[in-house]
Amino acid sequence: MIAPTVPILGIETSCDETAASVVAGAREVMSSVVSSQIDLHARYGGVVPEIASRAHLDLIIPVVAEAMIEARVVPADLGAVAATYGPGLIGALLIGVSSAKALALAWGVPFVAVNHLEAHLYAAFLEEPDLEMPLVVLLVSGGHTLLIRMDGPGDYHIMGSTLDDAAGEAFDKVARFLGLGYPGGPAIDALAMTGDPSAISFPRAILNEGYDFSFSGLKTSVINWVRKHPDVDAADVAASFQQAVVDVLVTKARRAAADVGAKGLCLAGGVAANSQLREAMLGACVTDGLRGFLPSRSMCTDNAAMVAAAGYHRLNSDGPSPWDTGAVPGLSLVG
Ligand code: KG4
Ligand code: ZN
């Protein structure tokens, strides 16, 4: 059992953010450094895996050094080095995993392999350690859309997931079609502020059925609508598209919370930074008498503080990870 005051170094390289953070006992964020590669990928309209891996290789040690200096810790202070080992881009993950193992071996501390999706769940607990269970978490990122019932640390049950595109993927694809660049989520979020969310009635797929999601029909519907109405105000399209995504996400999350008798609803993942989703989710929680928890925006998008926090819990429950741990690009949250 590692003491809750011992600092853990977390490393995150699963996609296009090179991040390192020192967190004491899954509670106190002593430093959190995130170096985004957005500028490198923007001209290609999305993340180029080969470029991401090379950039992680260049940046990983400077980012780790910055996180250690900012936290005012030296290697002898650390209780472990944790790194994301999946899901994500294989080359990108390999840089983080091998750097973390090398540092842990050299510094004589345990290495802990962390599931990126579990790390997103722990982002909420970093800011609100006393969240009551059972809790329904809506984890919405570039690669995943999951409705999760959480009964305790490490105790998850997936209630629903996407049948096609992830929520963030839908934002990115629609933004790309509208010529808003990469990453699409923040661009649509900003443009939608000046648009009318009821201007166009886009479909809300399988709204009243089960807990799964489907966003690819919505994306196609946006594309077809814009092709038929080339003079449409892009802000109205962005706002109407965003409203459709938010309606589906919030409706299903509320229903899930009611069905499992959850004490609260929590958001996680990059799309949880979306202004409209945050507002709608908080409003729904007030109406339904649920405790609503929205991590700060910087904790929603990829960062290493959440990796260090998840690493602390994994180390205490499972012990150190083996030195031959590899990267698992298709890793899932459970099983
Ligand atoms: O969690 P994350 O940083 O990385 C993954 O694990 O995928 O999520 C990235 C996704 C991208 O699709 C991005 O467009 C989306 O989160 N995103 C947003 C916003 N900020 C980031 N989507 C909607 N509104 C935002 N403000
Ligand atoms: Zn993520």
Image: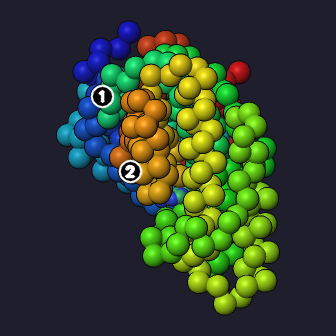
Query: Could you tell whether 311 is left or right of 184 in the image?
Result: left
Amino acid on which the number 1 mark rests in the picture = Arg
Residue at coordinates 69% horizontally, 75% vertically from top-left?
177
Label 1 near ligand 2 (CB < 8 Å): no
- Residue 159 picture quarter: top right
Which is nearer the eye, 261 or 131?
261
Dot 2: what SS?
helix
Where is residue 311 drawn, in percent x and y?
45, 26
Label 2 near ligand 1 (CB < 8 Å): no
Where is residue 68 drawn, in percent x and y?
29, 42
Disc 2 target residue: 298
Name the image quarter holding the N terminus.
top left
Residue at coordinates 39% horizontally, 37% vertically from top-left?
286
User: By what rule are the colours in the image chosen?
Assistant: rainbow
Disc 1 target residue: 27
Other residues around mark 1 within 10 Å, as few (<14) / some (14–19) / many (≥20) = some
Name the image quarter holding the C terminus.
top right
Which is nearer the eye, 80 or 256?
256
Dot 1: what SS?
loop
Q: Image height check: is 151 above or below 121?
A: above
- Residue 98 picture quarter: top right
Alpha-carbon distance for marks 2 and 1?
16 Å
Amino acid on which the number 2 mark rests in the picture = Ser
Which is nearer the eye, 24 or 51?
24
Q: Image height check: is 190 above or below 34?
A: below
Which is nearer the eye, 41 or 66?
41
